[in-house]
Amino acid sequence: MREQPLLPAVEARTTATSSRLTDLRAPAMVGVAGLAAATLLHLYDPHQSGSYGFCPFLVLTGHPCPGCGGLRAVNDLSRGDLVGAISSNALVVALVVILAVTWGRWIGRRLQGTRDQMFVLTTRVGLSTIALLVVFGVLRNTPWGSWLAP
């Protein structure tokens, strides 16, 4: 015969708490990875030429790719220099904001008990993202979008 717990409410709360902590494991790991990357970029300055290597697209063509200036932008953001970050790569600044909001909403959903992914990349969103990268890359290499160049 199984003994009945003396405090079933405490046992239920403990189970719910451990389940909630398990649900938050993935968002916590993503947050730690993002914080580690930002810390690396904060401590090891990418503004020094070649400190993280060179962009192959820039070396081969002489034109910046859509990602050029992204490391400098994150470094500037980690130092609180929003204007410097935008001048390095406005698209990366927007991406950092989008990822931070998405991550925060993911935590909120996990706290409410919904076990899902941070985001789901559908074909439509994927193709739209590729189109945005192409447009941004072309625009920043034209006279009209020269203000977007790093």
Image (cartoon, rainbow, N blue to C red):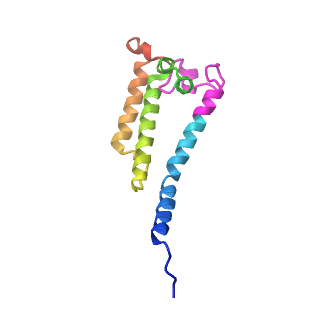
Residue farthest along the top direction in this orientation: 143
Between 62 and 83, the one nearer to me in the picture: 83
Q: Residue at x 49, y 24 (%)?
A: 65
x and y, in percent, of residue 58 in the image: 55, 21
Between 8 and 92, the one nearer to me in the picture: 8
Residue farthest along the bottom direction in this orientation: 1
132 vs 61: above or below:
below
Between 55 and 125, the one nearer to me in the picture: 125
26 vs 101: above or below:
below
Residue farthest along the left direction in this orientation: 124
Name which quarter of the figure residue 44 lies in.
top right
Magenta stretch contains residue 63: yes
Q: Residue at x 45, y 42 (%)?
A: 103
Name which quarter of the figure residue 36 lies in.
top right
69 vs 16: above or below:
above
Residue farthest along the front direction in this orientation: 6
x and y, in percent, of residue 110 in the image: 43, 52
What span is in magenta?
Answer: 38-67
- How many labels, in total? 0
Dominant secondary structure of the residues highlighted in magenta in the image: loop
x and y, in percent, of residue 136 in the image: 41, 24
x and y, in percent, of residue 24 in the image: 49, 52
Q: Residue at x 35, y 35 (%)?
A: 128
Magenta stretch contains residue 73: no
Between 102 and 80, the one nearer to me in the picture: 80
| 48 to the left or right of 91 | right
